[in-house]
């Protein structure tokens, strides 16, 4: 019976968490039929099966993480079974993962090696019966001594469930003041790693300015198909045209100034904060940008974005004003060189033509990598965007 192993997930990802099985034992599957939803650190994707036959076993339950290369599904039936190591070149699946792209080479039906199942009495050793590197890592990271864990798997193999049971016992006897634990994994871990890298590697500086956004809101009301973030995004692209140093990244001892603007924007979802990317934003009008932002936001909240939609950004914008705050010491989305944020727009006293008036005011904040430019460039960019916000009709004339 061929085993289907969890395939290479790409983007440096080494494991995935099972979300939902789409098939059950006894179901008949065809080549490239999605059999399970797997959540990676980037997105939720459907995994297609490269075999056809009858499902004889599913390996792993919802919520369980599997390492790349671990057995995911076992398919029975005489069709397509080969001796271990044999690959038959014929027409069949070229898929790796839906959402991760398919092979451009001539497609082949993949034949897995026959399952290497222990058919004789196990060799008794002094080492704990653990075959999964994922289980070993789980135990190591939580300080569990595997010598003290009783395995409930075949021949006494210690499974993930056994280690989790040990952790549950530990939690049950721990003092109440210890509180609850939230696993730092999946998307949460990816975001944490990237933010830590940013703080560790980027010598960032921050500049900010208060802006009269009265005309900005009037322009938004007149352009009914364009949102505030889309207007800010358009002004950002125009600003990067004048100050291209901020659309760059540091690679070794070089600053690489990029010709194209792949604009990222922060989006809050049930799975946490993600940064979808609108590619070639310099080619889009305000209306097209607004449509692209809306489409990416909806896909992000539905968990339908592929990893490619969440990588490759060159500059990020963030409307944290929707959370009711005025400003933020934002963290740059490594390896980008800057991030622009907009706070809430509220009534404030403002001097207009020498007279005190009540205007709609917000704060714009720019965090930038001080290696790619100095304060004069960063201040010039921020002032340009601020002028666009204060006089949007003039700025939109550059479309």
Image (cartoon, rainbow, N blue to C red):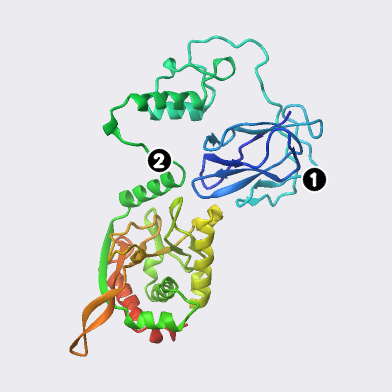
Residue at horizontal 54 percent and vertical 23 percent from the top: 131
With 376 as the anchor, is 12 left or right in this view?
right
> Which quadrant would the N terminus be assigned to in this image?
top right
Can you see residue 320?
yes
Say which of 199 and 173 sits in front. Answer: 173
Disc sitting over residue 184 in the figure: 2
Can you see residue 285?
no
Say which of 248 and 334 sits in front. Answer: 334
Residue at horizontal 47 percent and vertical 76 percent from the top: 226
Which percent across, then down, holds residue 344?
A: 31, 69
Do the CB atoms of the residues marked 2 and 1 lie less than 8 Å apart?
A: no
Q: Residues within 10 Å of mark 2 (few under 14, many from 20)?
A: few
Instruction: In the rendered view, tell whether residue 201 sits above or below residue 3.
Output: below
Q: Mark 1 or mark 2, which is nearer the start of the sequence? A: 1
Which percent across, then down, holds residue 168?
A: 41, 27
Q: CA distance from mark 2 to mark 1?
A: 42 Å
What residue is disc 1 on? 91
Say which of 266 and 195 sits in front. Answer: 266
Residue at horizontal 34 percent and vertical 36 percent from the top: 180
Instruction: In the rendered view, tell whether residue 382 sits above or below residue 72.
Output: below
Instruction: In the rendered view, tell whether residue 134 sits above or below residue 94.
Output: above
With 109 as the anchor, is 202 left or right in this view?
left
Residue at horizontal 28 percent and vertical 56 percent from the top: 203
Q: Residues within 10 Å of mark 1 (few under 14, many from 20)?
A: few
Which percent across, then down, holds residue 214?
A: 32, 81
With 397 as the anchor, is 50 left or right in this view?
right
Which quadrant of the structure image shows residue 365?
Answer: bottom left
Which percent across, then down, holds residue 21?
A: 62, 40
């Amino acid at each position: 019976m061929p085993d289907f192993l969890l395939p290479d997930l790409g983007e440096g990802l080494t494991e995935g968490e099972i979300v939902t099985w789409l098939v059950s034992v006894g179901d008949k599957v065809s080549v490239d039929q999605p059999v399970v939803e797997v959540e990676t650190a980037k997105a939720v994707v459907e995994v297609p099966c490269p075999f056809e036959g009858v499902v004889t076993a599913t390996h792993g339950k919802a919520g369980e993480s599997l390492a790349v290369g671990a057995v995911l599904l076992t398919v029975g039936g005489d069709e397509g079974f080969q001796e271990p190591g044999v690959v038959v070149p014929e027409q069949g699946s070229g898929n790796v993962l839906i959402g991760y792209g398919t092979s451009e080479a001539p497609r082949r039906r993949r034949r897995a090696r026959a399952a290497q199942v222990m058919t004789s009495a196990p060799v008794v050793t002094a080492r704990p019966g653990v075959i999964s590197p994922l289980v070993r890592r789980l135990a190591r990271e939580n300080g569990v001594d595997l010598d003290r864990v009783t395995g409930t798997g075949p021949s006494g193999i210690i499974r993930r469930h056994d280690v989790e049971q040990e952790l549950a016992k530990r939690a049950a006897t721990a003092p109440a003041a210890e509180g609850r634990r939230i696993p730092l994994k999946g998307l949460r871990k990816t975001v944490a790693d990237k933010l830590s890298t940013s703080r560790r590697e980027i010598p960032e500086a921050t500049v900010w300015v208060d802006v009269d956004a009265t005309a900005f809101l009037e322009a938004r009301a007149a352009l009914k198909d364009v949102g505030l973030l889309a207007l800010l995004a358009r002004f950002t692209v125009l600003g990067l045209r004048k100050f291209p140093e901020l659309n760059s990244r540091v690679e070794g001892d070089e600053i690489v100034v990029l010709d194209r603007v792949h604009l990222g924007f922060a989006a809050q979802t049930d799975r946490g904060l993600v940064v979808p990317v609108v590619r070639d934003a310099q080619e889009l009008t305000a209306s097209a940008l607004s449509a692209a932002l809306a489409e990416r936001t909806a896909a992000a909240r539905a968990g339908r974005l592929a990893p490619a939609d969440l990588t490759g950004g060159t500059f990020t914008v963030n409307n944290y004003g929707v959370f009711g705050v005025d400003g933020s010491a934002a963290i740059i989305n490594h390896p980008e060189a800057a991030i622009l944020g907009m706070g809430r727009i509220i009534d404030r006293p403002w001097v207009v033509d020498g007279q005190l008036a009540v205007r709609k005011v917000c704060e714009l904040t720019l965090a930038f990598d001080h290696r790619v430019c100095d304060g004069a460039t960063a201040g010039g960019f921020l002032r340009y965007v601020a002028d666009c916000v204060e006089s949007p009709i003039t700025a939109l004339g550059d479309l």
